[in-house]
Image (cartoon, helix red, strand yellow):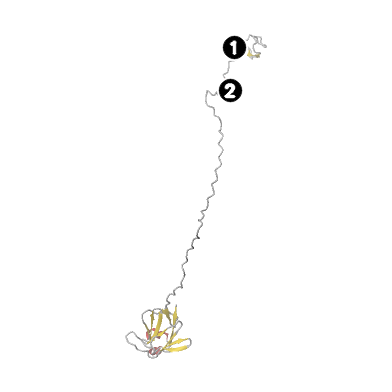
Amino acid sequence: MATCPNCGSENREGAKYCDDCGGKIDLAIAQPEPVSPSEGAEEEGLSPSFDEDEGDVDPGPSAEPEDEPTPEPEPEMEPTEPEGEPQAEPLEAEEGPLEELPRAGYLVFPDNSEQPIPPSQWLIGRADLSKFLTDPKQANEISRGHLTVFQEGDRFFIEDGTTMVQRKASSNKTWLVRDGSRILVTGTGRNELQDADEIDVAELVKLQFVLK
């Protein structure tokens, strides 16, 4: 299009005179200035294009390589025992009879107190038993060394009187009561004690022998 320099009207291309005002159109003036491709593209909001020689063009996101399938591990083979003679089973230790631990012997007094019998000789007399008497005047009927108990190995014994220095019998005797029977200890030497035996001292105080 040719623009009239006088009135600014647009005329057909190549016109020498303006159709509106009749003024002369100078083609050199009316010819619009050429616009470079880059400027025209910027005015239209387009980004310029580049040839391959002018620079690198971002090719865009590259396609990611597909993951290769992971090979499955081969199943492990369980070790097999070689064929041949069967293996012998381990021998179990033979269990023998359990040895019984030696039991301790105790004397139970009238107040239900318990005293263990020591390995050495234990002399029991008036000083130990008078407190259990209902009548204190009867204390003289119990000898100072009325009986002796002692242990030998896993066995327990009783003797009347004292045997520490010289044998001396008690004044009013000692008995064992076992299964309802009375066994005289005085004058018979040592007597082995059995569990639940009752010891009768001068028919005044009763003790009991127990094994634990």
Q: Position of residue 212 (x, y in %)?
A: 44, 77
Side of 54 where 23 appears, left or right: right
Outermost right residue:
19
Q: Is residue 152 above or below residue 46?
A: below
What's the amino acid at mark 1?
A: Ile
The residue at which mark 2 appears reads as 41
The residue at which mark 1 appears reads as 29
What's the amino acid at mark 2?
A: Ala
In the depicted view, which residue is nearer to us: 154 or 58?
154
For label 1, count other residues whose C-alpha is less than 10 Å away and answer few (under 14), some (14-19) or many (20+): few
Q: Secondary structure at mark 1?
A: helix
Q: Position of residue 23 (x, y in %)?
A: 64, 9
Q: Position of residue 102 (x, y in %)?
A: 42, 76
For label 2, count other residues whose C-alpha is less than 10 Å away and answer few (under 14), some (14-19) or many (20+): some
> Which residue appears at 40% of the width and 81% of the height?
156
Question: Looking at the rendering, which quadrant does residue 47 occupy?
Answer: top right
Side of 14 where 189 appears, left or right: left
Nearer the observer: mark 2 or 1; the answer is 2
Outermost front residue:
84
Task: Quote the CA–CA distance across marks 2 and 1.
Answer: 24 Å
